[in-house]
Amino acid sequence: MTGTIDAQAVMDVLATVPDPEIPAVSIVDLGIVRGVDAARGAVRITPTYTGCPATLAIEQAIRHTLAAHGMGHLSVETVLSPPWTTDWISAEGHEKLRAYGIAPPSGPASLPAGCPRCGSMRTVEVSRFGSTPCKALWRCQDCLEPFDRFKCH
Amino acid sequence: MSDQAYFDYLLRLGDDSLVLGQRLGEWCGHAPTLEIDLSLANVALDLIGQATYLLGHAGTVEGAGRDADRLAFHRDALDFRNCLLVEQPNGDFAQTMARQFLFSTYQRLLFQELAGSTDADLAAIAAKAVKEVAYHADLAAGWVVRLGDGTPESHRRMAGGMEWMARFVDELFVMDALETGLHARGLAVDRAGLRPAFDATVAATLAEATLPPLPAHRPVTGGRKGHHTEHLGHLLAPMQHLQRTYPNAVW
C-alpha cells in the first residue's frame, strides 16, 4: 500500500463498530480501541475482561468494517498492558449507556448507583455478576425496575 | 528459544485456571438461583480467559507450534500440571464455594506478585486478571460467611466443604527446585512467601463465618508432577471429547 495512514480516519471508521453485547455504544466509546499505530499499520485493541466472549466477535467486526472502508490491509493487535479500566469509557459512552438503561460506572460498588430509568438513588445490588462480565445486576427501590450497572473496574 | 522449566511453570498456572473454569461450568443451569448461576458462569469464563492467555503464552515459550487449544485439548491427564484442589468435584454449593474461596484467595495474592514478573507478557496477564480474581474472592468469601453463619444445616455443609478442601491447600504453596530456579530469575513467585497473608485472610473469614479454623490434614500433593486424583480424567473426557474424536475441528 502507498501513502500514509490517517489515524483519525481509521478511528472515525472504528467509531461505527458497535459493541456486540451493548450495541448502543461503540468500541471506541468503551475504550476497547487503544489506538492506531500509523507507522506499523495496526489497530490496537484491548479486551475488557480476559474471558469476555465478545472479544472474538469484536475483532471480526473490526476486520469486516475496515475492509468495507478500504482499510483491510491494517492489522489488528490485542494488547493487555496496561489493563483496561472503566475510566477509559468516554463521557459520550456514559450518556449512551444511561440512555440505553445501563447505569454507567460510578464509584465503588458499595455506593448506590443512580437508577437509569427514574434517577432515584434508592437502589440495591442484587448480584455482583450480571448478564455479562462487565455488568452487575441492581434494582431500584422506587420504580422497582431491575437494571444493569456497568462495574467500576 | 525453548525454556522447558518456564514452559512447565506456565502450564501450572494455565492448567489451574482451565481445570477450575471447566469444573465451574458444570454448574451452568444447575445452580440454586439464577443469580448464582450467572455468577458461577462469569467466574468460569474469567478463568477460561486466563487459561487462554496463559496456555497461549506457554505455547509460544515452548516454540513447538502448540497453541492454547492444542495444549488444552490434546494432552492427557498425566501431562496436566494443575493443583489437586481445582480438580476436586463440585460437591454441593457449599463445597464449591469453599474451594473457590481457598483458590481465589490464593490466586489473588499470586497474581498480585506475578504482575511484577520480569516476563512482561506474564506480568501483563497477571495485572489484567488480578482485577477479576478480586471479584471471585469477594463472591466466595461472601458465601462462606453467609452459609457458615446461616442455618445449622448451611453451617454444617460449609464446615464440611472446608474440611474436605483443606487437605489440598498446602500444595498451593510448595516451592520445588523448578520454581526456586525460576524465582531466582525473577520470572516466578515465591509461593511460600504468600502463605502468611493467605492464612490471615482465611482465618479472618472463617471467624466471621463462625466456622472452625481449617483442620490440619496430611497434605495431599502431586498435581504439579502430573500425579492427579481420579477426578481429573473424568473432567477431561467430556472437555476433550470433540477435539480427540475430530482432531483440529473448527467452526
Image (spheres, coloured by chain):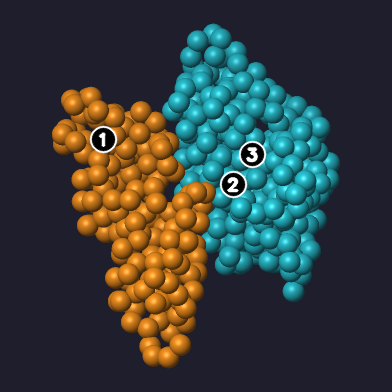
Between B87 and A3, the one nearer to me in the picture: A3
Q: Residues within 10 Å of mark 2 (few under 14, many from 20)?
A: many
Residue B17 spot, x, y in % from top left: 63, 45
Q: Which residue is mark 2?
A: B48
For chain A, what colour was chosen?
Answer: orange
Q: Residues within 10 Å of mark 1 (few under 14, many from 20)?
A: some
Residue B64, quarter of picture: bottom right
Q: Which residue is mark 3?
A: B22
Disc number for residue B245: none
The answer to whether marks 1 and 3 sit on the same chain is: no
| Callouts 3 and 2 close, C-beta under 8 Å | yes
| Callouts 1 and 3 close, C-beta under 8 Å | no
Between disc 2 and disc 1, the foreground one is 2
Disc number for residue A112: 1
Residue B170 spot, x, y in % from top left: 72, 37
Q: Is residue B81 visible?
A: no
Between A69 and B195, the one nearer to me in the picture: A69
Chain to which mark 3 belongs = B
| Callouts 2 and 1 close, C-beta under 8 Å | no
Residue at disc 2, secondary structure: helix
Q: Amino acid at mark 2?
A: Ile
Residue B109 spot, x, y in % from top left: 56, 47
Find the residue positioned furthest to the bottom.
Answer: A2
Q: Earlier in the sequence, mark 3 or mark 2?
A: 3
Identify the residue at horizontal 47%, vertical 78% (top origin): A73
Identify the residue at horizontal 39%, vertical 51% (top origin): A20
